[in-house]
Structures are given as structure tokens and as C-alpha cells.
Image (cartoon, rainbow, N blue to C red):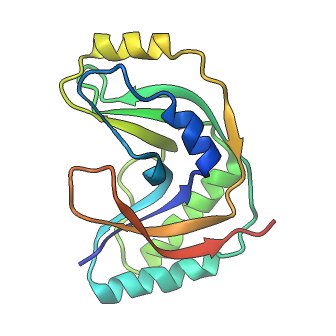
Amino acid sequence: MPRLFTGLEVPRDVAFKLALKRGGLAGARWIDPDNYHITLRFIGDVDRPTADDVADSLDKLANSLQFPVRLTHLGSFGGDKPRALFAGVEPSEALSRLQAAQERVLQRVGLPPEGRKFVPHVTLARLRGAGAGEIARFLAEASRFEPLTFVPARFVLYSSRDSVGGGPYLVEQAYPLAA
């Protein structure tokens, strides 16, 4: 039973620059830069026939128009109990349209609606035992974040193992975006 999600790949040059932010934070489990991505839709554990239906239905969105993605800041999720450090994505209409189109297509396959609000980001680290003050200090020291922009050539259907997170992720199918 595969665990699936859709996302945008982060190019190697951008991943390298993000990886330079790694280190200096106790309790951080840093994600391998090869696994950096922007999740568009978490699908979850599905049986093989459903996985095949998902892959086929996403094909309808192939050749959607390319658009720029801009990473603008570092942040954390979890408030007083931080659980993840991320690079935030500047909101864009094109990104929201692609995510919403995937949501509609996947609901037609029979998947339940995504319960969480779409907050595009690249997870850089999972956090354990790092306090909010420690995270605030890290973010203040790393506040000089030079925005990074890239144009994805495709979106991807990924699979992952049931683990504590962070990969490795496998590309099950890729869907080109039109220039």
C-alpha cells in the first residue's frame, strides 16, 4: 500500500542554497536536500488500484502552464512546540490554481477533501526538543534570507515509506508543465 503525495521538485541549485542554512540548531533532523520539495496535496496510504486511478487522473493536469516559484523566508510550524523548520513560498495565483485543480481531480477519484489549509513551503528540518526561544534565535540569526526563484518544469506524484518523515521519496510519475 503506497503512501502518496504530489509536489514540485526543488532544483539542485536552489536546494544547495537552502542546504547552506543547515546546522546550528539542537534537536533538528535536517532533510536531505535531494528530498526537498513543495507538497501540493498529501494523498496518504492507498491501495494499488486507487494509486493507479490517482496517477491516471493527474494526467489530466499535465501541460498546465509553468509559473515561477519564489522562496522568500524561513519559518517554523508548531508555535510553542516547534515541529518543523521551513522555507516559505510566496503565494501565487498560478500555484494556488494548480493545487486547487489537483484537489478537484483527486476528489473525483474518491479521495476525501484535504483537511488542512494549503501553506506552500519546503521543509528543511524536523524538530524534536527544540524550544520556541531556540527556534526564534535561529531564525533571527538566519534572517538574511536571499529570496530564491525557480520555474518548475513538472509536478510529481511521489511515494514514501511510512517513516518519521523526511524521505526518501520516490518519483512514481511526473507530469510536465508547459512553457
Query: Measuring 26% from the left and 82% from the top, which residue is drawn there?
Result: 47
- Please identify the residue farthest to the bottom as the structure is shown: 49
**Rendered position, 90 above or below 160:** above
Q: Quadrant of the C terminus?
A: bottom right
Residue situated furthest left in the rendering: 129
Which picture quadrant has residue 153?
bottom right
Which quadrant of the rendered structure holds the N terminus?
bottom left
Image x and y of residue 144, in percent: 60, 16
Looking at the image, how many numbered discs can be counted on the residues?
0
**Which residue is located at x 56 percent, y 60 percent?**
100
Relative side of 35 to 62, left or right: left
Depicted 141 relative to depicted 40: above or below: above
Instruction: Kindly indicate the quadrant of the structure image that contains residue 27.
Output: top left
Percent of width and height locating residue 24: 36, 19
Task: Give whichever of 105, 32 is nearer the camera.
Answer: 32
Q: Position of residue 73 (x, y in %)?
A: 56, 27
Of residues 137 and 45, the one nearer the viewer is: 137
**Is 88 on the left or on the right of 151, as rendered?**
left
Residue occupying image coordinates x 30% and y 10%: 133
Q: Position of residue 155 (x, y in %)?
A: 58, 65
* Position above or below: 26 against 83: above
